[in-house]
């Protein structure tokens, strides 16, 4: 079943067109990795899907309903949660408070304080620590946990491993792999192509606002994605 369908989406920052005619689908239970160089338009695309940025053309269908004009808070209630680049936690609040605040805005479902802490066990000893005192990995786990507390049907993750120590990235991806195995539907922006190919079911590569390569992660080589990443390959769709 298609959960998310993006059709001919255009998004701008003033005169700059950051997203150009982007079309793709994500089925329930799939993980789509969105890769591409800095400035390719990945963040703008995720923010547009979440309702944080208004598109100038195109449609976003979520579970069959056109949500293009639906504001961000209402999209959250329908089950679209964004983990933004840079985490944006409430710095003066504890981990627990950050999680509970989010829970108040979402939907009912399996995710609560206990299940989030089970999914990110590194947070257990830090539950009463202020977000500002956490390591980067702990902050990122809190940011993802905060999104899960809203019980999303679709999780949009923007560069969750950016700036983290390798050991923190490992821990984070172990938790993400468990989420994926549990049936989560995820769109993941990831700079690390090998890691993206490792967890994703599908991969889409963006260049200058367009998706120039899209296909099943298992059928794509790292070389193909790298070439598309740097604009060395003609546009194509592998499947
Ligand atoms: P990165 O990996 O650097 O975050 P990205 O692929 O996520 O890159 P975007 O952040 O979506 O790309 O940026 C796409 C284009 O839009 C870039 O040219 C960027 O400079 C521009 N842009 C992004 N945000 C703004 C903004 N708030 N105002 C003006 N231009 C912006």
Image (cartoon, rainbow, N blue to C red):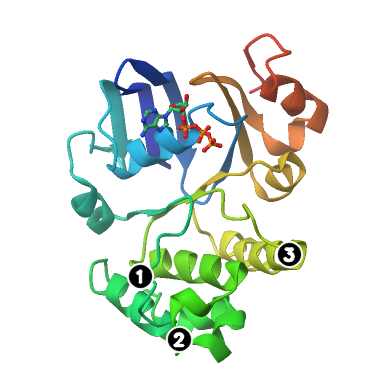
Sort mark 1 into few (<14), some (14-19) or many (20+) by Cα contacts within 10 Å: some
Please give the name of the residue rendered at 65% of the width and 41% of the height, measured from the top-left corner: 191
Q: Regarding mark 3 in the picture, which secondary structure is present there?
A: helix
Query: To which residue does mark 2 refer?
Result: 114
Percent of width and height locating residue 235: 63, 11
Query: To which residue does mark 3 refer?
Result: 170
> Left or right: 28 with respect to 54?
right
Percent of width and height locating residue 169: 69, 62
Q: Observer-nearest residue: 226 or 30?
A: 226
Is 126 located above or below residue 106 in the figure? Answer: below
Total marks drawn? 3
Which badge, 1 or 2, is on the more N-terminal residue?
Answer: 1
In terms of image quadrants, where is residue 108? bottom left
Please give the name of the residue rendered at 44% of the width and 82% of the height, measured from the top-left corner: 130
Query: CA–CA distance between discs 1 and 2?
Result: 20 Å
> Left or right: 178 with respect to 28?
right
**CB-based contact (under 8 Å), mark 1 and mark 2:** no
Query: To which residue does mark 1 refer?
Result: 90
**CB-based contact (under 8 Å), mark 2 and mark 3:** no
Q: Regarding mark 1 in the picture, which secondary structure is present there?
A: loop
Name the disc covering residue 218, or none.
none
| Quadrant housing the C terminus | top right
- Distance from mark 2 CB to nearest ligand 1 atom below 8 Å: no
Percent of width and height locating residue 74: 19, 52
Which badge, 2 or 3, is on the more N-terminal residue?
Answer: 2
Q: Observer-nearest residue: 88 or 236?
A: 88
Query: CA–CA distance between discs 2 and 3?
Result: 22 Å
Instruction: Report the mark closest to the observer, 2 or 3.
Output: 3
| Quadrant housing the N terminus | top left
Is 165 located above or below residue 85 in the figure? Answer: below
Please give the name of the residue rendered at 26% of the width and 66% of the height, measured from the top-left corner: 106
Please give the name of the residue rendered at 30% of the width and 35% of the height, measured from the top-left corner: 61
């Amino acid at each position: 079943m298609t959960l998310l369908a993006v059709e001919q989406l255009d998004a701008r920052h003033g005169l700059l067109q950051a997203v150009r005619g982007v079309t793709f689908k994500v089925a329930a239970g799939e993980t789509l990795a969105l890769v591409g160089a800095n400035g390719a338009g990945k963040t703008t695309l995720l923010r547009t899907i979440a309702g944080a940025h208004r598109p100038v053309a195109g449609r976003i269908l979520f579970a069959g309903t056109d949500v293009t004009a639906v504001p961000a808070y209402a999209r959250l209630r329908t089950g679209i949660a964004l983990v933004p680049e840079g985490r944006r936690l409430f710095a003066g609040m504890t981990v627990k408070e950050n999680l509970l605040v989010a829970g108040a805005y979402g939907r009912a479902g399996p995710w609560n304080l206990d299940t989030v802490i089970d999914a990110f066990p590194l947070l257990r000893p830090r539950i009463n620590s202020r977000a500002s005192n956490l390591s980067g990995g702990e902050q990122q786990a809190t940011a993802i946990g905060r999104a899960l507390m809203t019980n999303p049907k679709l999780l949009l993750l923007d560069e969750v491993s950016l700036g983290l120590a390798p050991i923190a990235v490992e821990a984070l991806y172990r938790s993400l792999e468990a989420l994926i195995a549990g049936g989560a539907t995820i769109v993941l922006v990831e700079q690390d192509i090998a890691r993206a190919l490792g967890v994703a079911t599908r991969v889409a590569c963006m260049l200058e606002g367009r998706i120039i390569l899209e296909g099943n992660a298992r059928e794509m080589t790292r070389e193909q994605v790298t070439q598309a990443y740097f604009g060395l390959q003609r546009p194509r769709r592998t499947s």
